[in-house]
Image (cartoon, rainbow, N blue to C red):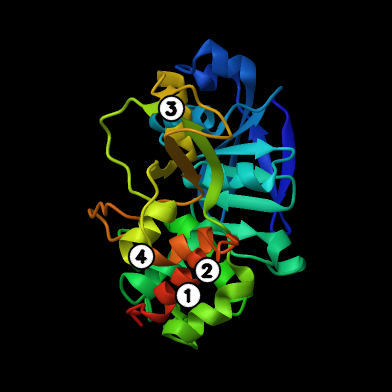
Amino acid sequence: MNKTKNIVILGKAIPLQERSKAQMKGVTIGDMLAYSFFDGMYLGVPMLFAEPKGEVASPLNLSVTAGNLTSLFNLPTVFLLASCPAYERQRLIDKNVFFVVSEKYAHLPMLVANERVRRSKTAKSLTPVAQYILLYHLQEESLEGLAARDMEGMMPYTYTSITLGITCLADLGLCEKVAEGSKRKVIHFHKVGKELWKQAQPFLITPVEQRIFCDEFLSDESFPTCGINALAHYTWLNPDPERIIMMSAKQLREMKTSGALVRPNEFDGNVIIEAWKYPLVAKTGEKPQWVDKLSLAISMRDDDDPRVEGEVERLINEMKWKV
């Protein structure tokens, strides 16, 4: 006899019924060994719940498994996880993987729920997504009066990630979410331009996750210039002789694996690579040669060279704000 169990989503008990092997026809042996499967319904939507029997797979593998199961049974697949740290939850959300973590967190087809956020202290700094949204608003085009769904095609993030980013901005007092009708909430900024930039100062995070040096960079792929050379492009400074480029942490790992970095190290080299926490701030389809001015200023604000400090200040004073 198949067992039943209850889970709790936002305080509501949801009964689950375990599926028999006969009901799982077409599922790979690997997935049958790795998961227990249950049927359940939340807010009137039937879903397939998969509970890992042992170690939880990577977000990428969970995404692949969910895609296969959803295609096979035509049901949203939701993973039941005993625990999941914040950075892993964000990776799952970015890959649009649905999950329930004990009674604390849920990411489901019909909602984005994070019960703990409402019960704990608000954020103390911007998340990478929230900072991207803010810098896009200040430099590229105004987001005033837009909903998260409106921004989805404007940024390299999912609807869910954008929603969480807006929540972070609102928690820090940099914007508010205003109801527009019964189902739509739009973003509203109380300050504009340089005043909004000043207000954000205590919450900004450096975009640089890692900095690495190498003697040569054997890749034909184009990457934007960052660091002192980008500052030299925007101001009166002279550039350094080294090549200084920005890429994502994932791209850096791929370059290391491919052997594109000749003698990589943490101290010195002809090429300096910065792995950034968020993508290049730019309109969709655009590929600027230089990182955006505000991210550049943030990345260099701890540089104690008086020349750099002066030119960063000039950069901000001469900004042409979009709002």
Contact, CB < 8 Å: mark 3 with mark 1?
Answer: no
What distance separates the C-alpha of mark 1 from that of mark 2? 6 Å
Q: Secondary structure at mark 4?
A: helix
**Are the residues tagged 4 and 2 within 8 Å (C-beta)?**
no
> Which is nearer the N-term, disc 3 or disc 4?
4
Secondary element type, mark 1: helix
Query: Residue 152's x, y, as percent?
Result: 35, 60
Q: Residue furthest top?
A: 29
The residue that disc 2 covers is: 309
Which comes sooner in the sequence, label 4 or label 1? 4
Q: Earlier in the sequence, mark 3 or mark 1?
A: 3
Disc 4 target residue: 151
The amino acid type, in three-letter code, at marker 3 is Asp
177 or 100: nearer the viewer: 177
If the image is split into quadrants, where does the N terminus sit?
top right
Marker disc for residue 215: 3
Residue 66 visible in the snapshot: no
